[in-house]
Amino acid sequence: MPRMPAVEAAPLANDTFLRACLREPTAYTPLWLMRQAGRYLPEYNATRARAGSFMGLATSPDFATEVTLQPLERWPLDAAILFSDILTVPDAMGLGLSFAAGEGPRFAHPVRDEAAVRRLEVPDMERLRYVFDAVRSIRKALATSKDANGRPAGRVPLIGFSGSPWTLACYMVEGAGSDDYRLVKTMLYARPDLMHRLLDVNAQAVAAYLNAQIDAGAQAVMLFDSWGGVLADAAFHDFSLRYTRAVVAALKREAEGRRVPCIVFTKGGGGWLEDIAACGADVVGLDWTTDLGRARKRIDDRVALQGNLDPAVLFAPPDTVAREARAVLDSFGPAARPDGRHGGHVFNLGHGISQHTSPEHVAALVEAVHGHSRAVRPRPR
Ligand code: CP3
């Protein structure tokens, strides 16, 4: 694929997120929200209606740029995340993705037998060009956009992302979301050879996909292992973490003269924290079942942590949201350690924001995270 020139290097007005990922000192704790562009925002629903469908949004760089910026225009979030979906990769493999209204994703051609697994190939990245075009378009818009007060608050880093090889395999074999993962686990236990072949193709595809996002201008990347937590201990290591590690090892780690941090998020992965933290990522994302302070001790700040407010907290009144946000910040504790080293904390939810969330409550969250973390930082001498 022809290489497009990277976006003209515009200086980042706000690199707090990148600094926290790399465990460098910051003036406050940065935050962004998983699924920050989504159905809880009326302006997202309006753009989605114009685009006709979710895939209509995701495959149009103009629409994808518009909705990526929507949450940043409302609040001073510290990062933008590419508007797309993890299922674009299996779609490019020919599985036929669709999102029926009111239902989750569905594949027309799930991978259920030996012949289907043997047919799988790393897709030509040209088929995902719309994603890389969106990355370039969002970077351009971030370099020039202003927030409601006319400040260049949009000048925050852009996060690219992909599903992990295992999480993609769940959708590819099940053909949709699942309650019990019966089909994908049947293949894993009955035909581990087929599952390994599938995961190997996925790992190569995901690495190529993330590297192409980095080439297009993504300044950090995140791997969503949303369903790693449904696996038995040994299976998690053999079928999920092993392939996550392979992806991380194949990633470009520098672009535009800066390190490109890599975040690995395993929902339900708290019990494997030490192993996940050793996979080569700069940041480990945690859900709300793990205490951040104890997590820090377990990994001795060898990586930064991202998380981990329960998204359900946002259903409570703004005062409660603020109190719970402060509790998450306090559980992490001061980033600076007595021994001179630094931890890193990126505030986030422990999973995606619900479509039933009130935007006013998000305002309270952003204010509490920025305000409280600034107030408890030691004053610079
Ligand atoms: O964070 C962001 O703002 C970026 C956009 C983003 C989307 N999906 C947009 C989206 C990201 C990072 C994802 C990741 C994703 N997609 C994951 C991993 C994170 C997680 O939630 O565990 C998974 C498992 C998927 C698969 C997926 N896509 C499902 C299960 C669904 C349907 C569920 C739902 O909420 O309806 C989607 C659709 C989807 N992807 C929506 C959005 C905003 C809602 C679709 C709509 O507008 O109708």
Image (tube, helix red, strand yellow):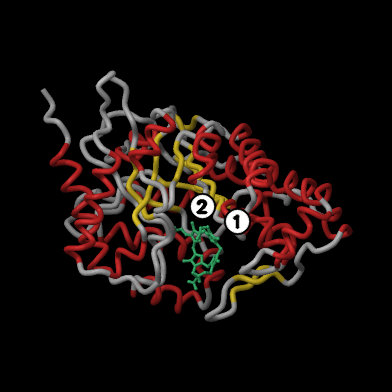
Q: Position of residue 63 (x, y in %)?
A: 46, 65
Q: CA distance from mark 1 to mark 2?
A: 7 Å
- Determine whether, in the image, residue 212 is placed left or right of residue 326: right
Identify residue for label 2.
268
**Which quarter of the image is occupied by the C terminus?**
top left
Badge 1 amino acid = Val
- Closest to the observer, 24 or 124: 24
* Residue that numbered label 1 is attached to: 230
Q: Is residue 78 left or right of residue 284?
A: left
Q: Mark 1 and mark 2 in contact? Answer it, CB < 8 Å.
A: yes
Q: Residue at x 28, y 48 (%)?
A: 328
The quadrant in which residue 362 appears is bottom left
Q: Of all residues shown, which one is farthest toward the right? A: 115
Task: Find residue 59 and report its horizontal and vertical position in percent.
Answer: 56, 64
Residue type indicated by callout 2: Gly
Q: Which of the 4 image quadrants contains residue 314?
A: bottom left
In the image, which disc is placed on residue 352?
Answer: none
Taking the image as shown, residue 274 lies to the left or right of residue 304, namely right
Badge 1 crowding class, 10 Å Cα cut-off, few under 14, some 14 to 19, many 20 or more, is some
Q: Nearer the viewer, residue 15 or 215?
A: 15
